[in-house]
Image (cartoon, rainbow, N blue to C red):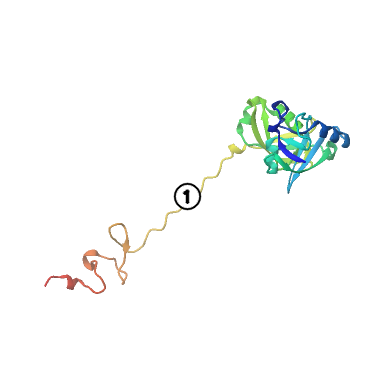
């Protein structure tokens, strides 16, 4: 099949949580795959996402699957018709989640009563995989999309977010984590012993190690001396 962004669909047909196909493909998939709820396992190269099948899109191409952009980002695709491999699975292929740990990127999440809405959102996504980042719009924040890192899932690294017995926990938001201050750099050690400093701050020494004195040693070359400079 070919992979398309759902921005190519009419706005009413776009869904942030699921993928969709044409009416003809939707009928074929639901007839060939048993299960109350179906998921597309979409592979591009070495990358893979699992997306719940939503309602069919009447204006969709016959040989294409449409996805929200945040899922396309996981695949590294632009969603402009790239070829992909798709296999269909039922919800019975995944163990039901007992515990999910999330880390929001934005601490604004904690200023809203979002737990119940988030539980519904996870249920709509359906399959949650450890290590993924979900992009969830929350109505309690005016539709603001909050990225959520999936830190932990039990009893497996891929689980079905289904039912009311899932324990959902949260880690501190990414933007609230204080970065350690860099250690101060020690100044260079001060010079020891007598030094001579000329205009401009340059340090100069004589061959015998004594400090250079412009009045005594002068700007002479190796062929001149102070005696030679005295008028006769």
Q: Position of residue 174 (x, y in %)?
A: 61, 38
Residue shown at 50% from the left, 49% from the top: 183
Q: Residues within 10 Å of mark 1 (few under 14, many from 20)?
A: few
Residue extending farthest to the left is 232
**In front here: 84 or 112?**
84
For disc 1, the marked residue is 184
Quadrant where the N terminus is found in the figure:
top right
Quadrant where the C terminus is found in the figure:
bottom left
Answer whether residue 107 is visible to the viewer in this image. Answer: yes
Decide: is 49 above or below 26.
below
Residue shown at 24% from the left, 66% from the top: 219
Q: Quadrant of residue 10?
A: top right
Answer whether residue 150 is visible to the viewer in this image. Answer: no
Q: Position of residue 44 (x, y in %)?
A: 73, 45
Q: Position of residue 191 (x, y in %)?
A: 37, 61
Q: Position of residue 188 (x, y in %)?
A: 42, 57
Answer left or right for 173 relative to 195. Answer: right
Q: Quadrant of residue 201?
A: bottom left
**In front here: 191 or 47?**
47
Answer left or right for 200 relative to 15. Answer: left
């Amino acid at each position: 099949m070919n992979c398309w962004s759902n921005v190519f669909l009419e706005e009413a047909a776009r869904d942030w949580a699921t993928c969709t196909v044409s009416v003809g493909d939707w009928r074929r998939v639901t007839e060939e795959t048993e299960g109350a709820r179906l998921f597309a396992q979409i592979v591009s190269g070495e990358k893979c996402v699992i997306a719940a099948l939503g309602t069919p899109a009447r204006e969709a191409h016959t040989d294409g699957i449409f996805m929200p952009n945040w899922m396309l980002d996981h695949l590294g695709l632009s969603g402009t018709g790239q070829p992909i491999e798709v296999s269909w699975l039922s919800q019975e292929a995944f163990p039901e989640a007992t515990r999910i740990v999330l880390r929001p990127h934005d601490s604004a999440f904690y200023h809203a009563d979002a737990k119940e809405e988030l539980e519904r959102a996870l249920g709509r996504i359906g399959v949650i995989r450890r290590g993924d980042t979900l992009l969830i719009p929350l109505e309690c924040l005016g539709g603001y999309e909050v990225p959520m890192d999936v830190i932990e899932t039990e009893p497996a690294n891929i689980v079905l977010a289904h039912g009311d017995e899932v324990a959902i926990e949260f880690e501190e938001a990414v933007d609230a984590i204080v970065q350690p201050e860099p250690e101060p750099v020690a100044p260079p050690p001060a010079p020891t012993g007598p030094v001579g400093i000329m205009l401009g701050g340059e340090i100069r020494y004589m061959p015998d190690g004594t400090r250079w004195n412009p009045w005594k040693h002068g700007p002479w070359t190796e062929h001149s001396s102070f005696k030679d400079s005295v008028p006769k």
